[in-house]
Amino acid sequence: MEPLRRESRHPRGAGSSAATASTWAPTPASPPCTTWALLGILWSTLTSALHGFALVGSENVPAAALMPFAEAWITHVVLPTVQGAAQQVDAGHYATDISAVELNAMGVPKMIKASEVQGVRPDLTVPVKGFLEKRVADGHGADALASLIEVIRNGDR
């Protein structure tokens, strides 16, 4: 299958605060995968934001009050992390000296517990805990979070 071609356009005009949108000119066999990939990113991002809203809401903080922090977090932490992960996945190399799998494997259970204490379902985080634990058990605790792709791709193989 040939790679997807990226064609950029500006949906709201020049000078807009909207990020540059991209359209893909995929091969005939790839549109469903591209669509599902993008919808997966949407759903996981949205449901994670809703989880965050539930957490702050458990302290009587309106969801909108979290948005300035969420916007900065997504812009300056999440997006660069995802971009870096894409590069690591494509290269198949997961070296890191920050935020390794093992460190996150210790932190995620605390997030799950905090959710439960606040009366918020931790269901979205539980699979992440499993992915992290699998990578640690397989001897890859020092790898970057992008290495979770190996669990996602290969399951229990």
Image (cartoon, rainbow, N blue to C red):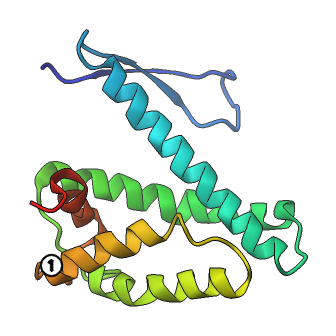
Expressed as whole percent of the image width and height from the top left, the position of residue 118 reads 73, 83
Whether residue 41 is visible, yes or no, is yes
Q: Secondary structure at mark 1?
A: loop
- Residue 67 in the figure: left or right of residue 45: right
Quarter of the image with the N terminus is top left
Whether residue 143 is visible, yes or no, is no
- Residue 140 in the figure: left or right of residue 78: left
Quarter of the image with the C terminus is bottom left
Towards the viewer: 6 or 141: 141
The local crowd at label 1, few if under 14, some if 14 to 19, many if 20 or more residues have their Cα within 10 Å, is: some
Q: Quadrant of residue 82?
A: bottom left
Image point (45%, 71%), residue name: 126
- Residue 30 in the figure: left or right of residue 41: left
Image point (58%, 23%), residue name: 10
Towards the viewer: 82 or 34: 34
Vertical placement of 31 versus 122: above or below?
Answer: above
Towards the viewer: 105 or 71: 105
Image point (58%, 87%), residue name: 113
Expressed as whole percent of the image width and height from the top left, the position of residue 115 reads 64, 80
Q: Which residue is mark 1?
A: 140
Towards the viewer: 26 or 105: 105
Q: Quadrant of residue 13?
A: top right
Expressed as whole percent of the image width and height from the top left, the position of residue 36 reads 41, 32
* Numbered-mark total: 1
Q: Label 1 is placed on what type of residue?
A: His
Vertical placement of 86 versus 143: above or below?
Answer: above
Image point (45%, 87%), residue name: 107
- Residue 76 in the figure: left or right of residue 37: right
Expressed as whole percent of the image width and height from the top left, the position of residue 151 reads 21, 61
